Image (cartoon, rainbow, N blue to C red):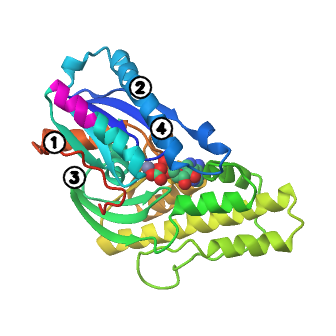
Amino acid sequence: MFVLGIETSCDETAVAVYHANRGLIAHTLFSQIATHAEYGGVVPELASRDHIRKLVPLIKTVLAAADLQAKHINGIAYTAGPGLMGSLLVGAATARSLAWAWQIPAIAVHHMEGHLLAPMLEDTPPAFPFVALLISGGHTMLIEVQGIGNYRLLGESLDDAAGEAFDKTAKMLGLDYPGGPKLAELANQGHPRFKFPRPMTDRPGLDFSFSGLKTFTLNALNETGQSPQDKADIAFAFQQAVAETLTIKCRRAIQLTGLKTLVVAGGVSANREIRRQLSAMADSANIKIYFPRPDFCTDNGAMIAYAGGQRLIAGQTQNLEIFARPRWPM
Ligand code: KG4
Ligand code: ZN
């Protein structure tokens, strides 16, 4: 079974082909970073227009790379939410139209389920059950995963998501969109100097709160002459605070559930310092830890093809409705 995966929830147009037995066959992606950079963030109207321009050519590219024709595709998986409504509609309408034309099923995929299952695309995938830490631009969640579709929310961010906190702090430090990776680079030049809190770690529970770190960033900025080194030191303090907070909560989730496997996914899981701290914790707690490859931490079509493919293989079907939900609980 060949599954075409389509991801257009935000500022990346991504397409992939996954095969039930042979794994990932081909994937491609166009990033709209250059389009949105001058505005300092994603402009929804520009995003959806660009998805319209890029999606069909990318589908042709990926089919050619996979050496497949339309007639070989057995199902289509598309991101139906959460995300920007206009962007989601481009993917949903295209997927549904192709499915109708090709007389094959199409299935709506939850974007965060895609992220959650991205590590399954690696050569040594995790085995169920596991604890998943999902850290992206819109979500920060700890989930107990018993199997595909069997999820229990253990904790989530009560305010800013981890990636959102990275992006907002980066903006305060004068870094360009998208700020998260740039802040991480700057933090590499930083030294221990400022003391930022580890929010909500001093009380029980698995929820997060990152919005207060903005105040610490602002105060630290105001204390200094805002030289490049000052900013690097602030970036360092911020990144350490996020990494340590995530690590403390993951250790707690592992203890509470008694599970022996931790899966970390979503855009922020590309962060090297966060990966390092979580891996060290996993080593000392004697548990296994899994990450997607860096390219599959951030948005991609492969994770959508995989997640939808699993549902199609399990026999799930949907009617012809164009299903898109900007807000959609997992
Ligand atoms: O998963 P993703 O590509 O899109 C969403 O579903 O939101 O995540 C994007 C988020 C952005 O906030 C971006 O700044 C952050 O992931 N991000 C990073 C890094 N790479 C991407 N944050 C910290 N360090 C990174 N290396
Ligand atoms: Zn995402």
Q: Secondary structure at mark 2?
A: helix
Sort mark 2 into few (<14), some (14-19) or many (20+) by Cα contacts within 10 Å: many
Q: Is mark 2 within 8 Å of ligand 1?
A: no
Q: Main secondary structure of the magenta part?
A: helix
**Residue in the image at 18% along x and 25% along y:** 102
Provide residue 318's location: percent of width, then percent of height. Answer: 14, 45
Mark 1 / mark 3, whichever is N-terminal? 3
**Residue in the image at 45% along x and 59% along y:** 282
As measured in the structure, the alpha-carbon distance from the residue carrying label 4 to the one carrying label 3 is 33 Å
Q: Report whether 32 appears left or right of 189.
A: left
Sort mark 4 into few (<14), some (14-19) or many (20+) by Cα contacts within 10 Å: few
The answer to whether marks 1 and 3 mark residues whose Cβ atoms lie closer than 8 Å is no
Mark 4 / mark 3, whichever is N-terminal? 4
As measured in the structure, the alpha-carbon distance from the residue carrying label 1 to the one carrying label 2 is 23 Å
Residue kind at label 2, given as amino acid type? Leu
Mark 1 / mark 2, whichever is N-terminal? 2
The answer to whether marks 4 and 3 mark residues whose Cβ atoms lie closer than 8 Å is no
Mark 4 / mark 1, whichever is N-terminal? 4
The answer to whether marks 1 and 2 mark residues whose Cβ atoms lie closer than 8 Å is no
Residue of label 3: 148
As measured in the structure, the alpha-carbon distance from the residue carrying label 2 to the one carrying label 3 is 28 Å
Q: Quadrant of residue 130?
A: bottom left
Residue of label 4: 49
Residue kind at label 4, given as amino acid type? Arg
Q: Is residue 266 visible?
A: no
Q: Report whether 148 appears left or right of 298.
A: left
Residue kind at label 1, given as amino acid type? Leu
